[in-house]
């Protein structure tokens, strides 16, 4: 049988997800890597001076070939992480990592880039092509190209090991989530939970052929308990399991424990930074970000904390007083916070998240989001049905210009299921690039983990889940609306990491906008629009406990930054000590000492946010200021087109700050964020 990962691909050809099997993965990767190595050898042996056409374009072709084989394997590992796909992924990962290191440490290739830049013709390159070459030279240096042979070999060892153990960190987290469940046969224990929450728990039990209800650590299940269950012991039990995932504490203590991996990851990152001439990994991380230095990031976080902490403390005091008055609660604990926050919101603002849920059936929210994007950017989004997918719940859509010409395509995989990695993310399937065969258009994956539909009823989203949907589609639009034809800087590629969240955070603002919500927030049974009074309450809720939410994000970001900036080999990882100090400075609600948040902090230990988690708060500054431009213009269509032209379409082809200034007319201000969050006096 032919291997679908090796099928000749015309520009724009999509993965044959209905044919790809785990056994295809390693065989395909072996062939592609061998072919690429041979092609690179021939490329570097060719006579004459390198040009864009003889150096960069062939390298783009090689990169595209890798992504067409490895991309679907990596994606399927995330969305169908069965034992077979995990084995296939882990067999391929070291091979792909080693190949990437070979490329990044290939001195002949590095010198070819240097010679290309030194040619007189380089001055005539477009700004985009110049940035491609200069970014590549920077990345060569950050990959140890200038190191002596012994140090270069050590750099490679570090990179290979980091790739392996960062993947293992994510596996341990997934395994620890799947290892825990709690069967409940006495429905009275679930008092307070929403009808949907209980129905989902009953459905999970039924799927396992169990009686009653099954509670798990998948976030929709966990949230249904921690936010609504009246039984405090049940909330504590679920909180304990959730807060100790993949650690040495809690009900699964020692199983799938990430503690040793965290220590090794930090040690190797620090050693890597020292090899490359940096004082610490935080300095290395910021080489590809907007921020000037680790200390500048710390000042930003502490300054924001100074503005938010007094609000957070007042919010916590109010919450504790409310819990005491309502239920006589004297010893307020973290497993009480979400529960009493929901009750306080209901009493204070007159509504709850659950009251909103009937107005956000998933298909309606998705279509409403599409309508917004069509209005903002002058595009059309149309369902396409002739595309192979990996699951029956996955839908595909074409993004087109108003005149019908194609822009790109995206897959939407919205619902949680067994063997699917938790969380929400956007990833690229294909990047936009111009080839000899024509223009390859961008294709994106959009993945969420909402509670699935029950029976014939649609999935009903919370407003938080609507925010998540809008957020991920913002990333998708950044990838899809690019007009850059050079692969290395089209879409999200080449974008400074602390600017990459701008389009996603920006989209969240529209989930509070009156006209946007009125266009799609209709009751799934009656068709009635969301009542004006309820809409006002939702808008008021935006600043509800925003101080607590802000200091929580600052706590995570400060912990991440200092963990990488202040690492000292003689002292070891000091993960929990670093976290405790950050909490002491900025937090107001301190978790119990057995809380092991770092052990499940995959953004930092398994993802791309190491020494960069602050990006979320920085991007909130950018996005709030960008949205303020729409408010100031009375939401004129011209502002939407300008945002598309200056930010979304440019990808990584220009400096992120320059693009923001081109849109806003000035550098970013923190004031709109403080205003939108209600953190002003």
Image (tube, rainbow, N blue to C red):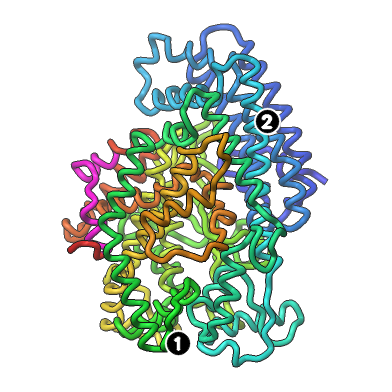
Q: Residue furthest top?
A: 48
| Magenta span includes 662 | yes
Count all numbered tags in the image, as a single digit.
2
What distance separates the C-alpha of mark 2 from that of mark 1? Answer: 55 Å
Q: Is residue 145 left or right of residue 72?
A: left
Which of label 2 and label 1 is nearer to you?
Answer: 2
Rendered location of residue 103, percent (x, y)? 61, 24
Q: Quadrant of residue 297?
A: top left
Element at label 1: loop
Q: Which residues are drawn in magenta?
A: 659-677
Q: Residues within 10 Å of mark 2 (few under 14, many from 20)?
A: some
Residue in the foreground of this view, choosing between 191 and 60 = 191
Residue in the foreground of this view, choosing between 631 and 669 = 669
Q: Is residue 520 above or below residue 101?
A: below
One can see residue 405 in this view: no
Rendered location of residue 556, percent (x, y)? 44, 53
Mark 2 lies on residue:
98
Rendered location of residue 15, percent (x, y)? 64, 48
Quarter of the image that includes the C terminus: bottom left
Predominant secondary structure, magenta span: helix
- Mark 2 or 1, nearer chain start: 2
One can see residue 617 in this view: yes
Mark 1 lies on residue:
525
Q: Quadrant of residue 209?
A: bottom right
Q: Residue at x 37, y 44 (%)?
A: 499
Q: Is residue 500 above or below residue 368?
A: above
Rendered location of residue 77, percent (x, y)? 67, 52
């Amino acid at each position: 049988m032919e291997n679908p990962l090796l099928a000749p691909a015309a520009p724009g050809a999509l993965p044959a997800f209905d044919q790809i099997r785990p056994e295809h993965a390693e065989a395909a990767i072996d062939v592609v890597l061998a072919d690429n190595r041979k092609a690179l050898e021939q490329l570097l042996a060719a006579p004459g001076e390198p040009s864009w056409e003889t150096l960069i374009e062939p390298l783009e072709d090689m990169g595209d070939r890798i992504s067409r084989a490895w991309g679907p394997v990596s994606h399927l590992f995330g969305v169908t992480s069965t034992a077979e796909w995990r084995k296939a992924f882990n067999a391929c990962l070291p091979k792909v990592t080693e190949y990437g290191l070979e490329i990044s440490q290939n001195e002949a290739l590095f010198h070819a880039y240097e010679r290309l830049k030194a040619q007189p013709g380089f001055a005539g390159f477009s700004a985009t092509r110049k940035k491609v070459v200069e970014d590549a030279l920077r990345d060569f240096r950050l990959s140890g190209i200038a190191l002596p042979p012994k140090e270069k070999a050590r750099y490679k060892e570090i990179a290979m090991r980091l790739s392996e153990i960062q993947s293992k960190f994510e596996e341990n987290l997934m395994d620890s989530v799947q290892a825990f469940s709690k069967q409940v046969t006495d429905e009275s224990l679930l008092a307070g939970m929403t009808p949907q929450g209980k129905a989902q728990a009953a459905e999970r039990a039924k799927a396992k052929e169990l009686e009653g209800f099954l509670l798990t650590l998948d976030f929709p299940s966990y949230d249904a308990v921690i936010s609504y269950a009246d039984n405090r012991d049940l909330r504590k039990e679920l909180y304990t399991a959730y807060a100790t995932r993949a650690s040495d504490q809690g009900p699964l203590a020692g199983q799938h424990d990430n503690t040793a991996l965290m220590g090794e990851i930090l040690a190797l990152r620090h050693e890597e930074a020292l090899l490359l001439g940096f004082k610490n990994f935080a300095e290395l991380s910021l080489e590809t970000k907007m921020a000037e230095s680790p200390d500048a990031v710390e000042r930003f976080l502490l300054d924001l904390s100074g503005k938010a902490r007094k609000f957070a403390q007042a919010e916590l005091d109010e919450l504790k007083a409310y819990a005491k008055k309502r239920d006589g609660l004297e010893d307020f604990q973290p497993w009480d916070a979400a529960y009493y926050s929901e009750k306080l919101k209901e009493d204070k603002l007159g509504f709850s998240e659950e009251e909103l849920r009937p107005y956000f059936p998933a298909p309606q929210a998705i279509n409403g989001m599409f309508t917004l994007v069509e209005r903002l950017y002058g595009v059309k989004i149309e369902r396409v049905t002739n595309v192979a997918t990996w699951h029956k719940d996955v839908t595909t859509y074409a993004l087109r210009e108003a005149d019908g010409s194609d822009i790109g395509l995206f897959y939407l995989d919205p619902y949680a299921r067994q063997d699917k990695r938790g969380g929400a993310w956007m990833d690229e399937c294909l990047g936009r690039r111009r080839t000899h065969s024509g223009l390859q258009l961008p294709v994106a994956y959009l993945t969420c983990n909402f509670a699935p539909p029950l029976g014939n009823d649609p999935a009903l989203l919370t407003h938080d889940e609507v925010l998540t949907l809008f957020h991920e589609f913002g990333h998708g639009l950044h990838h899809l609306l690019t007009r850059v034809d050079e692969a290395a800087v089209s879409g999200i590629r080449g974008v400074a990491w602390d600017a990459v969240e701008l389009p996603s955070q920006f989209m969240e603002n529209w989930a509070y906008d009156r006209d946007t919500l009125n266009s799609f927030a209709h009751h799934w049974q009656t068709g009635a629009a969301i009542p004006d009074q309820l809409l006002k309450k939702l808008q008021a809720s935006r600043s509800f406990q925003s101080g607590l939410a802000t200091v929580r994000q600052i706590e995570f970001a400060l912990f991440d930054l200092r963990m990488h900036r202040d690492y000292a080999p003689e002292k070891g990882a000091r993960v929990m000590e670093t976290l405790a100090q950050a909490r002491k400075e900025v937090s107001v609600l301190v978790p119990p000492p057995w809380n092991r948040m770092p052990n499940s902090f995959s953004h930092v230990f398994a993802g791309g946010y190491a020494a960069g988690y602050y990006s979320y708060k920085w991007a909130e500054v950018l996005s709030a200021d960008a949205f303020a431009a729409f408010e100031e213009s009375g939401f004129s269509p011209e502002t939407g087109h300008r945002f598309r032209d200056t930010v979304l379409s440019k990808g990584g082809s220009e400096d992120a700050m320059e693009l923001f200034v081109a849109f806003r007319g000035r550098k970013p201000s923190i004031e709109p964020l403080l205003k939108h969050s209600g953190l002003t006096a």
